[in-house]
Amino acid sequence: MNCPVCRQPMIVLELDQVEIDHCTTCGGIWLDAGELELLLGDSVEKDGFLASFEADAAGGEKHRRCPICSKKMEKVVCGAEKRVRIDRCRRNDGIWLDEGELEEIVTLSSLGRHNRVLDLLKDMFAKKAQ
């Protein structure tokens, strides 16, 4: 699969039976439909966080194309303060997370403290120290 941002081939990482497509060029991550839910695990907090996702019609970012269906994805904001903007396939093929957005989602969802998978993901994809 090619990255929807820089068009470079992505590598597949498997973590707890979830395949994460990662672009080593731009640092983005593609999660197929349902994979974010699997990574977040079972909890009331997870359900509340996922319910916070809503379309962001006001966003001025360029629309990206889904690497599965090639249709334009919609911009979605999430979290209580709606400060993380991600790309979601309109056909529900999955979501695109730019570099650092998965870390923000982990932080906003308040689930990282209790989920070893998220802690590992945060370590793997954390922004490089400057």
Image (spheres, rainbow, N blue to C red):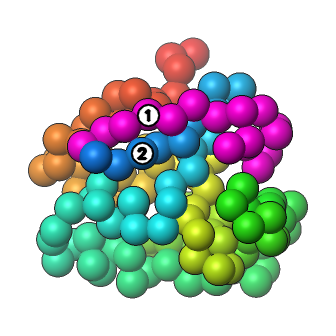
* Figure quadrant of the C terminus: top right
* Above-or-below relation of 104 to 57: above
Q: Over which residues does the magenta segment extend?
A: 1-16
Residue 103 visible in the snapshot = yes
* Above-or-below relation of 111 to 94: above
Name the N-terminal-most of marks 2 and 1: 1
Tell whether 128 sits left or right of 96.
left
The answer to if 84 sits in the magenta stretch is no
- The image shows residue 31 at horizontal and vertical percentages of 50, 55
- The secondary element bearing badge 2 is classed as strand
Q: Which residue is mark 2?
A: 19
- The secondary element bearing badge 1 is classed as strand
- The image shows residue 129 at horizontal and vertical percentages of 51, 17
The total of numbered circles placed on residues is 2
Q: Which residue is mark 1?
A: 13
Label 1 sits on what residue type?
Answer: Leu
